[in-house]
Amino acid sequence: MPILEGQGVTKYFGGLAAVSHVDFHVDQGEILGLIGPNGAGKTTLFNLISGAIPFKSGGIRFKGQKLNGLKPYQICRRGVARTFQETKIFADMPVFQNVLMAAFFGTPTRISGADAAREVTQALEFVGLSAMNETPVQDLTLVNQKRVEVARALATKPELLLLDELMAGLNSTEISEAMELVTKIRDDGITIFMVEHVMKAIMGICERIMVLHHGEKIAEGTCQEIACNKTVIEVYLGEEAHAGS
């Protein structure tokens, strides 16, 4: 059953259609991958879902309710959290404080300081950062900064998590660990919609894959169907498949 649905989603920047009449759905409990060449419209679609930029036309529904016109904090409080292609962190603040802000301001109901701290502790344990509570985020490695973003998203208690290139810049070992983390998040009851260029990850953990090219959806299907799709191979996999090797 779909938890997120989009119909005719369109966004222009000037005369350029960054996303053009895209229909999509994310089923509850799945990991859906979103791939395509640079500039295909992947992050723009995430920005539309999360309310960071307004629609040109079309509509998006989360659990049957329209997201059109809502602000990012309103969408987050309805149960949609995200991470970013480039980490959006409070660099000079400790890890714990970064995640605490999400626990306070990203949830739909008021929360006490004790309850917020408990949520933060659980989120940091979940992503493997409980030993770094007091470390300034700017002093962390890239992989751990990304885990702070994931912990911050989890602290808002989402039902749907948008992951925008979580594995970009990571080495092979870190990618494998990140794949395990994404699977663990899904197994904890959170639906995943992920943009990724690392094909090892996309093919390894996604149930379905959607492909964008020049803002249009050109394919959708199982990993095997996408891997054998001639159009996808021509415009993307032929150049990018080596990224997961």
Image (cartoon, grey):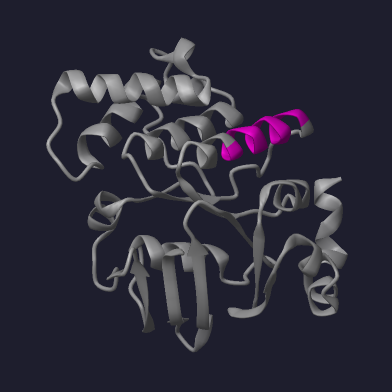
Q: Position of residue 236 (x, y in %)?
A: 78, 69
Q: Position of residue 139 (x, y in %)?
A: 50, 20
Q: Position of residue 196 (x, y in %)?
A: 65, 53
Say above or below: 138 vs 55: above
Q: How many tags in the picture?
A: 0
Magenta stretch?
A: 173-183
Say above or below: 233 vs 170: below
Which image quarter holds the C terminus? Answer: top right
Instruction: Tell which of 16 and 216 is nearer to you.
Output: 216
The reply, left or right, for residue 158 in relation to residue 87 is: left
Residue positioned 36% across, 33% down in the render: 90
Which is the main secondary structure of the residues drawn in magenta? Answer: helix
Residue positioned 18% across, 18% down in the render: 114
Q: Quadrant of residue 166?
A: top right
Residue positioned 87% across, 66% down in the render: 238
Q: Position of residue 84 (x, y in %)?
A: 48, 49
| Residue 94 visible in the displayed image | no
Residue positioned 58% across, 78% down in the render: 215
Q: Quadrant of residue 78?
A: bottom left
The reply, left or right, for residue 212 in relation to residue 81 is: right
Say above or below: 173 vs 41: above
